[in-house]
Image (cartoon, rainbow, N blue to C red):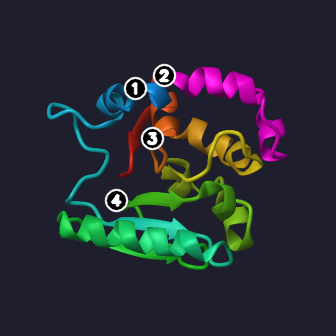
């Protein structure tokens, strides 16, 4: 339930979670095959569009560093990327927005007012939290509304794929 998730409550027990994520823990190779983009699949990103990675301006410094690291890798792969915070302008038409750690971005600082901004409704969230945490529960509504998502945790990315979501592992 979205209200419970926004309050940091989950709808499963630790046992449920271990049962659900067990296949990707026991067989990481199969999980990787499910979450890596296949050669014939389109990319989540278009090299012809500006990419902006948004991160909370008052959140955990680790997420800012992670956003900078992602931007560096994306630039090396040929993308035009900027790292922005909730204090910067929302994405313009034609830009692709990625939101690092939605459990912080949409709950801290100026990000609170941006959750329903048109530039962020179609953003690509980057999940950073394990499913048993209250932080994951806070991010969940934004992960579920997304058409595409990324996750830094293999088991989380695989679980979303097995739920039918377009999710890729950000390794």
Q: Position of residue 169 (x, y in %)?
A: 39, 44
Q: Nearer the viewer, mark 2 or mark 3?
A: 2
Give the residue number, with chain letter if any, for mark 4. Answer: 94
Q: Badge 3, how many Cα within 10 Å: few under 14, some, many 20+?
A: some
Give the residue number, with chain letter if any, for mark 3. Answer: 154
Whether residue 43 appears in this view of the structure is: yes
State how far apart marks 1 and 4 are (Cα): 39 Å
Q: Position of residue 93 (x, y in %)?
A: 40, 61
Q: Earlier in the sequence, mark 1 or mark 4?
A: 1
Q: Is residue 151 above or below residue 103?
A: above
Give the residue number, with chain letter if any, for mark 2. Answer: 23
Q: Secondary structure at mark 4?
A: loop
* Disc 2 and disc 1 in contact, CB within 8 angstroms: yes
* Disc 2 and disc 3 in contact, CB within 8 angstroms: no
Q: Look at 35% across and 34% down and name the residue there.
A: 35
Look at the image and give the residue range highlighted in magenta. 1-23
Q: Earlier in the sequence, mark 3 or mark 4?
A: 4
Residue 38 in which image quadrant: top left
Q: Nearer the viewer, mark 3 or mark 1?
A: 1
Residue 71 in which image quadrant: bottom left
In the rendered image, residue 151 lying in the magenta stretch gets the answer no
Front residue of this view, candidates 59 and 153: 153
Q: Badge 2, how many Cα within 10 Å: few under 14, some, many 20+?
A: some
Q: Secondary structure at mark 2?
A: helix
Q: Report the disc number at residue 27.
A: 1
Q: Position of residue 138 (x, y in %)?
A: 73, 48
Q: Earlier in the sequence, mark 2 or mark 4?
A: 2
State how far apart marks 2 and 3 are (Cα): 11 Å
């Amino acid at each position: 339930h979205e209200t419970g998730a926004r309050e940091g409550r989950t709808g499963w027990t630790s046992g449920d979670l271990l049962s659900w994520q067990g296949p990707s823990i026991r067989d990481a190779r199969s999980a990787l095959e499910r979450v890596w983009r296949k050669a014939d699949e389109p990319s989540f990103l278009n090299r012809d569009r500006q990419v902006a990675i948004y991160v909370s301006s008052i959140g955990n410094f680790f997420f800012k560093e992670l956003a900078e690291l992602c931007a560096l890798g994306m630039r090396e792969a040929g993308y035009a990327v900027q790292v922005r915070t909730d204090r910067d302008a929302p994405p313009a038409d034609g830009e692709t927005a990625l939101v690092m750690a939605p459990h912080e971005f949409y709950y801290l600082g100026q990000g609170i007012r941006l959750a329903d901004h048109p530039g962020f409704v179609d953003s690509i969230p980057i999940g950073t939290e394990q499913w048993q945490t209250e932080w994951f529960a806070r991010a969940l509504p934004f992960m579920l509304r997304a058409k595409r998502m990324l996750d830094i945790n293999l088991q989380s990315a695989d679980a979303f794929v097995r739920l039918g979501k377009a999710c890729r592992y950000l390794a």
